[in-house]
Image: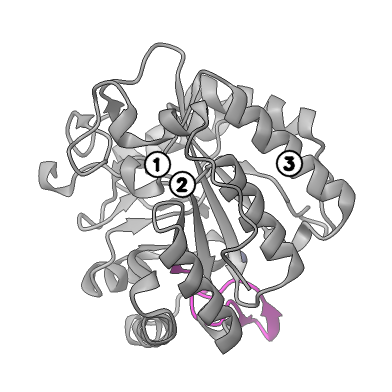
């Protein structure tokens, strides 16, 4: 059962940095970061000191309560780091749902449960793939899937479910997906953002043209309002358990993850870290995640936030 074995990290120094009410200046009354600038410009975070980086965590593909998920949840709670857990509606079983509700009740500020597609699969050109909203699915079809998924999570998770953030499986979406999300009242899309020079140029061009896709690749609006004006994007830059295109997984050790983080923070004031807890099923991978997250928690220039704290205001759009 949950609730008994987690260390209470409330007294630790890095938690004070992560806690909005304890941060000096720049935090809005509701605990959100104060944001300056318009919806389309670069978003500056008021109150963030020189050299500081905001970090948020997102863990995907939640559905069953497994030892690997428990390890992940325990670790971040122990470190006092909040995390958005993205739940796949069709994966979620009743036992896991009950555990997640208990977790939310015990640690409401540190765990968030959001929607990750509906079934996390589709057939494209006769082949079963893990994406769900690729290939030009019609609006009504996408709306039906996302609405069913949302209703299932709302029913099973009750008040533990937060229907504001949506992550499309494999970060695949199109204009119809975004219209559906806006129509259903979601306000933040979380996908991926790259920081290599070519991608940064490409995003600049794509955003100037108001495109969400250009030459077959996705244009990131990380920490900006999207062309679908009802949505903001807050995306992840570090893929801890990254799949290779050719299949198999890239085994990243803690020093490689730290190097990726150092590169990302040179270009982004808010760096999202994506995990896939189901991969943390060996002592080696668990140690890697523990080493990396502990180093983040001990870095005085890192401040933790929730994903939603980083969304620009749509009222400026
Ligand atoms: Zn996924």
Residue 273 part of the magenta-drawn span: no
Other residues around mark 3 within 10 Å, as few (<14) / some (14–19) / many (≥20):
some
In what element is the residue under mark 2?
Answer: loop
Contact flag, marks 1 and 2 (Cβ < 8 Å): yes
Residue 145 x, y percent position in the rendering: 42, 85
Contact flag, marks 1 and 3 (Cβ < 8 Å): no
Residue matched to label 1: 222
Residue 119 x, y percent position in the rendering: 55, 82
Q: Which residues are magenta?
A: 114-135
> In the rendered image, is residue 113 in sight?
no
**281, 18: nearer the viewer:** 18
Rendering quadrant holding ligand 1: bottom right
**Residue 53 falls left or right of residue 211:** right
Res. 262 image quadrant: top right
Q: Quadrant location of the N terminus?
A: bottom right
Contact flag, marks 3 and 2 (Cβ < 8 Å): no
Res. 61 image quadrant: bottom right
Q: Is residue 160 above or below residue 23?
A: below
Residue 16 x, y percent position in the rendering: 42, 30
What residue do we see at 53% from left, 60% from top?
171
Residue matched to label 2: 235
What residue do we see at 52% from left, 80% from top?
97
Residue matched to label 3: 290
What residue do we see at 42% from left, 28% from top?
17
Other residues around mark 1 within 10 Å, as few (<14) / some (14–19) / many (≥20):
many
Magenta stretch: dominant secondary structure: loop
């Amino acid at each position: 059962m949950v609730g008994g074995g987690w260390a209470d990290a409330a007294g630790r120094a890095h938690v004070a940095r992560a806690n909005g009410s304890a941060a000096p200046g720049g935090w809005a009354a509701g605990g959100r970061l104060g944001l300056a600038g318009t919806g389309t410009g670069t978003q500056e975070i008021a109150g963030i000191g020189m050299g500081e980086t905001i970090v948020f965590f997102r863990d995907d593909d939640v559905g069953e309560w497994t030892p690997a998920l428990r390890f992940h949840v325990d670790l971040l709670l122990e470190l006092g780091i909040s995390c958005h857990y993205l739940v796949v509606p069709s994966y979620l079983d009743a036992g896991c749902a009950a555990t997640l509700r208990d977790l939310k009740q015990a640690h409401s500020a540190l765990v968030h449960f959001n929607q990750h597609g509906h079934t996390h699969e589709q057939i494209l050109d006769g082949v079963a793939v893990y994406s769900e909203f690729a290939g030009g699915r019609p609006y009504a079809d996408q709306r039906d899937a996302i609405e069913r998924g949302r209703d299932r999570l709302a029913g099973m998770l009750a008040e533990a479910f937060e229907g504001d953030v949506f992550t499309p499986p494999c970060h695949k979406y199109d204009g119809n997906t975004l219209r559906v999300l806006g129509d259903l009242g979601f306000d933040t899309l979380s996908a991926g953002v790259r920081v290599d020079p070519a991608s940064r140029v490409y995003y600049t061009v794509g955003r100037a043209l108001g495109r969400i896709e250009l030459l077959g690749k996705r244009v990131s609006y990380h920490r900006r309002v999207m062309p679908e004006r009802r949505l903001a994007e807050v995306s992840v830059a570090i893929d801890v358990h990254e799949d290779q295109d050719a299949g198999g997984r890239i085994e990243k050790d803690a020093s490689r993850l730290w190097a990726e983080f150092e590169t990302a923070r040179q270009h982004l004031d808010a760096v999202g870290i994506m995990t896939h807890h189901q991969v943390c099923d060996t002592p080696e991978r668990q140690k890697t995640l523990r080493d990396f997250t502990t180093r983040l928690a001990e870095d005085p220039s890192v401040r933790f936030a929730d994903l939603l704290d980083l969304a620009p205001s749509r009222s400026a759009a």
